[in-house]
Image (cartoon, rainbow, N blue to C red):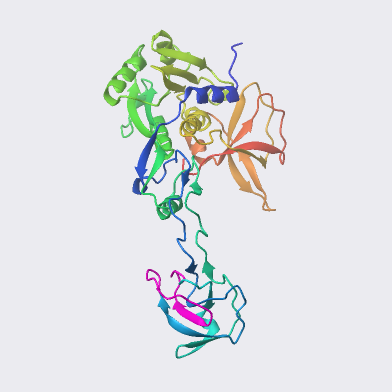
Amino acid sequence: MTELKPVAEAQDAIFSMMGQARTENCSLQAAAGRVLASDISAMLDHPAANISAMDGYALASGGNRLEIGAVAQVAGEAAAGHLSATTITSGMALRIFTGAYLPEGADCVALQEDISRDGNKITLNEAVKAGQFVRPKGMDFHADEIILRAGQILGPRHLALASLAGFTTLPVRQRPVIAILSSGDELVDVGTIPKAGQLINSNSIFLAQALTRAGAKVIDLGILPDKKGALISALEAGHAEYKDFDMIVCTGGASVGNHDHIAGDLIEDSASQIDFWRIAMRPGKPLIAASWQKIPFLGLPGNPVSAGVCALIFVLPALRHFLGLNARPEIHTLPLDRELPENDRRQDYIRAVYKTDENGTIRVKPLGKQDSSMLRNFCLADALILRPPFAKAAQGGESVPVIDIDASL
C-alpha cells in the first residue's frame, strides 16, 4: 500500500517551501486590500490639541465644579479651523463650536442649551466640571504610538486612520505573482463550445479569480497537451516572457495514468524537485508538491471539485503564509443535520450546507452526492465537513469539525 502524506504534514511542507513576499511602499490611494508589512506608529497626535466635543461655551473651571447659577462674560468665539488668541480665566467664557481648539486657560465646555445668555453674559443652567465635553490632546492616539500592526489587510478604515496619523504611503507586501496552467487534451478555453469528448477549462477561472481575490497577480500560461515534456516547455516559455513567479499552480495530469505527465516531467527535469506526491485526503489525493527552478510548484488534480478543495486547503493558505498572514483554514464545530458513516484512511472534506432547525440552531447538512466532478454541488456548499482518517460513524446532532467556504469564492 502506497504511503499517503497526512494533510497537516502536507500543509507544513508546502508552507516551508514558500518564502515571504518582499516589501514595497504603496500610496494610500492604491493600498486597499494590500497586506501591511510592518507595524506603523503615528507621526502626529490626534487630536493635536484639546478640542471642543460640542457647540457651547469654553470655561476655566480651575479644577473646581462650576455650579448652576455661575456667571461668565463672553470674550469672543472660536470655530473649527480658526484659533482664538484669547486666554480664558475664571469668570470668562468663549463661544466655541464642535472641533475648535480650546483657548488657553479653558478646560471645560458648557453646552449651548445648558446656559442662558443675556448680551455678553451667560448663566449656567447645568453644573460643569473640568474636562466636560472636551476631547483631550491625543485622545485617539499619540505620536509614536503603534496604530496598525503588520499583517493587517488594509481596508478603508485603516487607510483613513493612517492618513490621519500623517502617512501618505505605507509599507506593504508585494503582490505575489502566480503562474497557473491546466493539463489535458480534453480541455478547451472558456468561450469555446466543447465538441464530443471535450470539457471547458473551468479550473483556470476558479484559480485565477480565487488567487486574485486573495491578493495575487495571476499569469495564465494556458492549457498543456497530454504530452511528455509539455510542462517544462510551458514553464520555460512563461518564465522567459514574464520573468519571476512566486508560485506555480497546475491542475490536471497529476495522477498516474498513461496520459498524466506532470510528475514525470518534474522527475526528469534537472531544475525540478518533487517534495511529495499523493495526500491522504478525499478529494485531492494526487496532489504534487515540488519546485521548478526553486519556485514552489503545486500540481492539483484535474477534477473541478478536487482542484477547488485543494485550493482551499493548500493553495490559498500557502499564499496567505507568503504574505505573512495566518495561513491555516479556521476550523469550528457544528451539529450534524444527519448521520455520517465511518471514514477510511483518508481525511475527507465533505461538501455541506448550513440549515437552521426549528429551535434556531444552525446545523451542517452534507450534500447528497460527493463526486469530485460535481462543480454545482461545490458551488452550493457553505462549508466542508472535515472527517479525520478512521473517524467513527457520526450521528445526527453530533458536533463535527467544519471549515467555512468564503462566500466570495
> Is 134 colored magenta in this rendering?
no
Q: Nearer the viewer, residue 360 or 176?
A: 176
Q: Is residue 205 visible?
A: yes
Considering the whole magenta stretch, tell me its main secondary structure.
loop
350 horizontally vs 225: left or right: right
Name which quarter of the figure residue 201 lies in.
top left
Task: Give the image location of residue 103, x and y in percent.
Answer: 45, 72
Task: Give the image location of residue 401, x and y in percent.
Answer: 65, 36
Image quadrant containing the N terminus: top right
In the current view of this chain or complex, which residue is farthest to the left? 241
Residue at horizontal 71 percent and vertical 30 percent from the top: 393
For the record, the magenta segment spans 79-102
Task: Give the image location of residue 36, x and y in percent.
Answer: 44, 41
Task: Give the image location of residue 122, x and y in percent.
Answer: 51, 86
Q: Nearer the viewer, residue 174 or 81?
A: 81
Name which quarter of the figure residue 299 lies in.
top left
> Is 91 colored magenta in this rendering?
yes
Q: How many marks?
A: 0
Above or below — where is 216 with respect to 142? above
